[in-house]
Image (cartoon, helix red, strand yellow):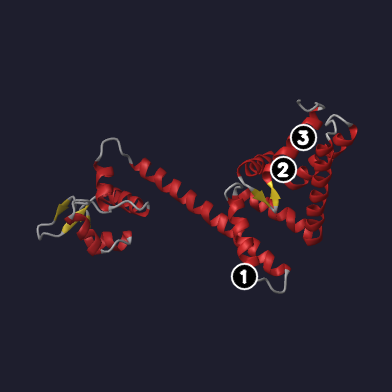
Amino acid sequence: MSRRGMTVGELARRSGVSVRTLHHYETVGLLMPAGRTEAGYRLYDDADVVRLHQIRSLRQLVFGLEQVRELLDGKGFSPLQVIELHIAQLRQQIDGQQRLSVRLEGIAATLRAAAQVSVDELLTTMEERTRMESYYTPEQLAELQERGRQLGEDGLRRAEADWQQLIDEVRAEMERGTDPASERVKALASRWQALVEAFTGGNPEIGSSLQRMWQQDETIHGFDTAEMRKLGGYIAQASAGATPEA
């Protein structure tokens, strides 16, 4: 910028903000030019350019013009705070885009796996993914999705069948009143842990997200989570070698 300052046309061209918008900012007292030429043309200095950048950043954060003015004119509000607010918003946008990408990849995988997918099946898939997105981060979902790709459709069906068979066996032992410290139940506990490890890949963060999902949702993949928590508690006693309380 030259020492004489920048005209409204120059500032508009270099900042991408229209002359009309700059005039409006002046009208509402948001951005006042530092001075004027003898002919009355507006001139903007370095501080004006910094303030314009702050205005644009705050506007992108969906602040109204009055809110922007209050923020910028308030004591202790610095350019760094504007940048940090903008960074926080960008991170939220990136996270949202990552979640959308993972969701679309999952739907695409469903469509590739079958020649035709009914609307009900597609909606069910989308609902399931939306629910999982409330518990797992985009990175965790991508990791789970990659593991699913590696297993393939047959592997996923085997895993579901293994879970169902194990649940049935654990339920039967619990209903019989089998001591969880028995070798039979301990063997079931080992199988339970192996299936959990296969799902989480040994990632403790995915394990924590899975645990939170089991605690808060009523059903997961068709399983009653209340029953699963009860069975899981029985298995936990087996893993610890404890006996059930009277």
* Front position among marks 3 and 1: 3
**Where in the figure is residue 35, as x and y percent of width and height?**
15, 51
Dots 2, 1 in contact, CB < 8 A: no
Residue at mark 3 to residue at mark 2: CA–CA distance: 10 Å
**Amino acid type, callout 3:** Tyr
**Amino acid type, callout 2:** Met
**Quarter of the rendering containing residue 207:** top right
Q: Which residue is mark 2?
A: 228
Badge 1, how many Cα within 10 Å: few under 14, some, many 20+? few
User: The residue tagged with tag 3: helix, strand or loop?
Assistant: helix
- Viewer-proximal residue among 116 and 148: 116
Total numbered labels placed on residues in the image:
3
**Amino acid type, callout 1:** Val
- Viewer-proximal residue among 228 and 156: 228
- Badge 2 or badge 1: first in the primary sequence: 1
Q: Which mark is residue 234?
A: 3
**Where in the figure is residue 246, as x and y percent of width and height?**
76, 25
- Badge 3 or badge 1: first in the primary sequence: 1
Horizontal relation, residue 96 to residue 161: left or right: left
Q: Which residue is mark 1?
A: 119
Q: Residue furthest right?
A: 183
